[in-house]
Image (cartoon, rainbow, N blue to C red):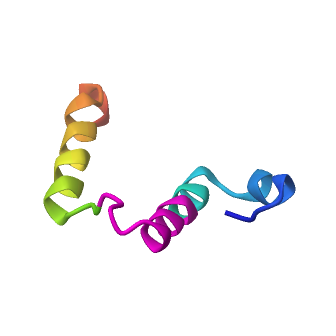
């Protein structure tokens, strides 16, 4: 992707993953696209997996 190790070290995980996702989409027409349904299902799975005291 062209980042130096120092730049990667300064990024948060979500920033790096957003860059990786954007790079993959820009460089591969077959890159998986996340739909709203997939996103909602992922959030629901995280919510269901959380301990009850966090609900």
Residue 35 found in image quarter: bottom left
Instruction: Give the vertical position of 44 relative to 40 (above or below).
Output: above
Give the farthest residue toward the left. Answer: 37
List the single residue furthest toward the bottom: 26
Give x and y (percent) for residue 50.
Answer: 29, 31
Q: Which residues are magenta?
A: 19-32
Residue 27, above or below 12: below
Above or below, 21 relative to 5: below
Residue 27 within the magenta-colored segment of the rendering? yes
Viewer-nearest residue: 2 or 49? 2
Q: Quadrant of the N terminus?
A: bottom right
Q: How many marks?
A: 0
In this rendering, position of residue 28 left or right of residue 34: right
Task: Point out the image quarter for the C terminus.
Answer: top left
Left or right, 38 with reference to 11: left
Q: Position of residue 22 (x, y in %)?
A: 49, 69
Q: Main secondary structure of the magenta part?
A: helix
Q: Position of residue 17 (x, y in %)?
A: 53, 55
Look at 83% across and 59% down and name the residue there. Answer: 4
Name the residue located 19 percent from the left edge and 33 percent from the top edge: 48
Observer-nearest of 11 and 5: 5
Q: Residue 37's x, y, as percent? A: 13, 58
Residue positioned 76% across, 62% down in the render: 3
Q: Along the horizontal axis of the image, is 6 left or right of 1?
A: right
Pick the residue in front: 41 or 31: 31
């Amino acid at each position: 992707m062209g980042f130096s190790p120092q730049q990667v070290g300064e990024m948060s995980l979500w920033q790096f993953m957003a860059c990786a996702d954007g790079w993959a989409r820009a460089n591969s027409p077959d890159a998986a696209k996340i739909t709203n349904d997939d996103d909602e299902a992922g959030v629901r799975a995280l919510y269901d997996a959380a301990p009850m005291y966090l609900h």
